[in-house]
Amino acid sequence: MKIEQSCVAVITGAGGGLGSALARELAVKGCSLALVDISQENLEKTKASLSENAGQVTLHLTDVTDRSQMAALRDDVSSEHGHINLLINNAGITFQKNFSTHSLEDWDKIVGINLWGVIHGLHFFDEALHASPAAHVVNLSSMSAFIGLPAQSSYCATKAAVELLSTSLWAEWGAHGIGVTHVHPGAIRTDMILATLDDSDDIEAAKKNYDIAMKMGIDADKAAEKIIRAVERNKKKIRIGKESFIFDYVSRFTPGLEKLLIKKIAQKQYDEMKTS
């Protein structure tokens, strides 16, 4: 898909992190943007950071887990922009909790945002995407879709579901000329971990993971650049960061090493929890 000034993009989770970076990348190209988030303040911050090259920019205070709000979002975008070329299902959260300490309410929240949020975006913008002469969808998965990490069961489950959903749509919608890209980032320097930090089983361990991501992760603007380039090249799947490539290759080609790696991580976490 050629991204140009006539392009209209809808971005969920646009109030910060990767979503905000994607908005900036598209704004430089002159795209019009429908920015979606649950925080009006963060949406305003993202809008203020955009290039003057941006086309029409609209802000939409929307909970992606709520069907009525997502239906209203579709109607608002249609009314204000007239059409849509690019849908980026970016909104997501993570819990650093063991399965045994996950409440069903935790599962409702993470499945609601990470999976239903994607499904809602696809469902409510289905007709508009099919009506566009050039359309593309980006679904944010994760390197965690490749390997089931301990204390990340809900995150891994939802991101693996997003990967397979995207693969199915790549074939199904591709026949209608709609591109679908699923993205598997490793560590990105964003504040996603902080959003649910206080809900972690081991807050100190969660803080360490955040510090590692800040130190070793790829910059969000660089990740956004890679994602938009993948859209323009109509790529089915992209991995971002060395660890994403490693996780993918290990899971596919060295299953024995994968088992050893995951077992060591789980044992270390268990030992730390016993001594804390």
Image (cartoon, grey):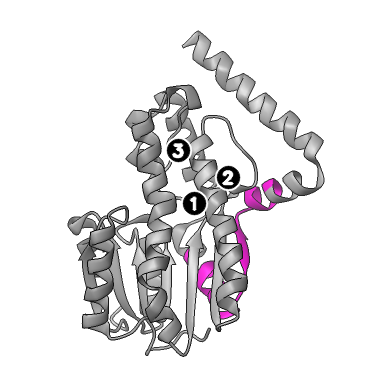
152 is higher (above) or lower (below) than 40 = above
Q: Say left or right for 238 vs 73.
A: right
Three-letter amino acid code at the position of disc 1: Ile
Frontmost residue, 126 versus 114: 126
Q: Name the residue rendered at 70%, 48% in the picture.
A: 246
Q: Residue furthest top?
A: 275
Give left or right: position of 246 versus 143.
Answer: right
Label 1: state its secondary structure: loop
- Residue on which the image places disc 3: 210
Label 2: which residue? 144
Badge 3 marks a residue whose secondary structure is: helix
- Tag 3 near tag 2, CB within 8 Å: no
- Closer to the chain start, of discs 1 and 3, is 1
Give the mark nearest the N terminus, 2 or 1.
Answer: 2
User: To which residue does mark 1 refer?
Assistant: 188
Q: Amino acid at mark 3?
A: Tyr
* Alpha carbon distance from label 3 to label 2: 16 Å
Residue 232 is inside the magenta segment: yes
Range of magenta residues = 224-247
Where is residue 257? Give x, y as percent.
78, 35
